[in-house]
Amino acid sequence: MAIPVSNVRNFAIFGHSGSGKTALTDAIAFKLGLNDRMGLTTNGSSVSDTSDEEKVRKISIFSVPFSATHKIGGDEYRINFIDTPGAPDFFGQVRGAVCAADFAVITVDAVSGVQVGTRRAWHICKSYNLSSVAFVITGMDKENADFAAALGSIRDAFGVNCVPVTAPIGGKICNILDIGELPSELEEMKTALSEAAAETDEELMNKYFEEGELSSAEIRQGLSAGISGGSVYPIYTVLPIKGDGVTEFLDSVCRLLPAPGKREFTDVEGNALSADPAAPVVAQVWKTAVDSFMGQLNYIRVFSGTITPGMTLQNNDNGGKETIGSMILMIGKKQIAVASAGPGDIVALPKLKNTKTGDTLAAVNNGTVMKPIDYPQPVCFMAVTAKTQADEDKLSTGIKRLLDSDPTLKFEKDIATKEGVLKGLGDVHLDVAVALMRTQSNVNVNLSVPKVPYREAVTSLGDGHYKHKKQSGGRGQYGDVYMKIEPNPDNDPNWFLDEIVGGAIPGNFLPAIKKGIEETMLAGPLAGYPVQNIKAHIYDGSYHDVDSSEVAFKIAASRAFREAMKNAKPVLLEPIWTLKISIPDTFMGAISGDMPHKRGRVLGMETDEDGVQVITAEAPLAEIFKYAAELRSMTGGQGTFTMEYSRYDIVPSNVAQKIIAEAAKNRTEEEE
Ligand SMILES: Nc1nc2c(ncn2[C@@H]2O[C@H](COP(=O)(O)OP(=O)(O)OP(=O)(O)O)[C@@H](O)[C@H]2O)c(=O)[nH]1
Ligand SMILES: [Mg+2]
């Protein structure tokens, strides 16, 4: 019999890297019978970290969904859950999961307590209307584990309405509400639960005041309302590897956490979707993956309606139709066929024709479009070169496959430096991308620090003249051009100005003169970089009735332009980027003090709403290609940053001299 939507629970597990998300996932998967033994990341047997890259690096890289049923007495529940990676390099996977889950489970290690990744997880949930959050304290079996300290750090960071529901009591994990007689030191926890429950409802509050206590059923009722409304946050303790506390966690999740429909999902126009299995289908792709056997897999979350194989749906982002062949879930390496998917369910759809992450699939004639999923912008750039010609031939296919399954990766061909540049969220992200390209597409590439796309410009007015005159038998060549160039800081598109008087140059040669300048601008005279932000005034010249030609004027213009550039105090420009660096307090001095070493400067510092310090700084791109790795090592992985292109600015002359000398050297080598 189908499980009613009210008995579906759908959550994603977030948290700091290494805080036990995958261990918790393996423990749940084992408990729910998805695996016949407890998977472990340490020996590569985890049901979640199954890719070679995850096994070698011992970190999660992908968000992986699971689904199973859980019985409490005679009630059957469907538990859909997603394990997400904690490393900031793979935050794109987290973004997708945030859009697919009804509530969040955030893991906190009992030794470290709340960490930056914990705050980041909380922050993203809150900013995307994922308001029901539960915490799971892991690692209680570790040396130096401190339950009280971990609990305290959660309440300090996220408020006193974070209340333990299960806790280690007498060497075992118990549900506080199920224990009649609590040890006196734990009475406080029950009081916290009762108070949190009472605050959600006036009737409960009155009763609590009058009688001094609430029954377990009343507490559950109050907690459940508070959790759905995002004002109460339950805390669980689980020892995943021992399997302790898993059943207590799952039982309580089914009792207290919201079913699909409580978290309001809205379409682009702000209309709420109803979690009705009989409504027209609306689902969104929150993740696209490439499987070596099945090819592309689109993972959807169903919001409304029920999908069954054979159904035709429309893609409301591109207008295409898709027939649903099969629906599956990958449990470890096993493929499980799913017969139907309703509100709150997550399934993978193989072999869709033209659907990608973020797209809405809906019933035919239902025009609902979900909000696109927004992804963080790249902060780490590397140049990609194919190892062999065979790799070069397959490179674009390999890159396309990568980009299709990872919206946080970008690939751009830089016209000035002629390099293909792969952009992602960190050096590990790019290294993993290279490894995936090898395994998915058999393309082998090297990564190297990219060339900086410098530009050339002028800082004053400069004059240039060239007379191109050649007499070599037959018809000669004659073109004579005088021009002035000057800075064009606002990039006025009207940069080419015909100021010829008295017909010194006939108008029909002006397009050739413009072309001569434009072609020369592609490789400027200083160091061969494109010239930008100049204005050219063509004010005089002469011509010859027979020998003047477009080619002759083009050559004259090119030479005159080069001379004018030299006289107009040319400079090299470099891209400057603005960085927003989030770090714990203790690193403020080190990180801001490091900026001048990167020719950068700090523009401001502030504390964001979650108590994290944010430094705004700017620095030349040339100095920050490796910043992702440097920040990680300077902060022991606690810092993250975003960056955004700001502008081109003049390269200081001592640095410029080196770049110009290098370019001259390369030019001589090429000529030789
Ligand atoms: N002793 C002990 N070890 C744990 C516990 N939870 C996780 N570990 C170990 O800690 C390490 C990291 O655990 P994971 O479950 O991979 O952590 P994660 O949060 O999934 O890490 P990422 O996905 O990479 O962010 C592994 O070696 C686990 O075996 C725990 O409760 N007790
Ligand atoms: Mg993991």
Image (spheres, rainbow, N blue to C red):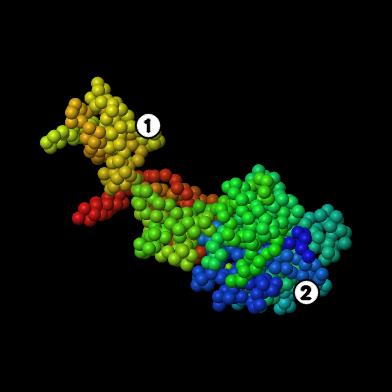
- Quadrant where ligand 2 appears: bottom right
- Tell me: is circle 2 under 8 Å from ligand 1: no
Are dots 2 and 1 in contact, CB under 8 Å? no
Q: Residue at x 61, y 71 (%)?
A: 334
Evaluate whether residue 42 shows in this view: no
Q: CA distance from mark 2 to mark 1?
A: 82 Å
Evaluate whether residue 212 shows in this view: yes
- Residue 75: x, y in percent? 80, 67
- Residue 110: x, y in percent? 63, 70
Q: Quadrant of the N terminus?
A: bottom right
Label 2 CA crowd tier, 10 Å (few <14, some 14–19, many 20+) = few
**Foreground residue, 529 or 164?**
529
Q: Is residue 131 left or right of residue 637?
A: right
Mark 1 secondary-structure assignment: loop
Q: What residue type is disc 1 on?
A: Asn
Q: Residue at x 68, y 64 (%)?
A: 338
- Tell me: is circle 1 under 8 Å from ligand 1: no
| Location of mark 1 (residue) | 494
Q: Residue furthest left?
A: 473
Q: What residue type is disc 2 on?
A: Pro
Which quadrant of the view contains residue 497? top left
Residue 77's tag is none
Q: Quadrant of the C terminus?
A: bottom left
Q: Is residue 346 left or right of residue 599?
A: right
Q: Residue at x 58, y 57 (%)?
A: 352
Q: Going from the N terminus, do you reach mark 2 or mark 1 first?
A: 2
Residue 115 versus residue 56 in the image, above or below: above
| Location of mark 2 (residue) | 183
Mark 2 secondary-structure assignment: loop
**Foreground residue, 622 or 259?**
259
- Residue 31: x, y in percent? 69, 74
Q: Residue furthest right?
A: 210
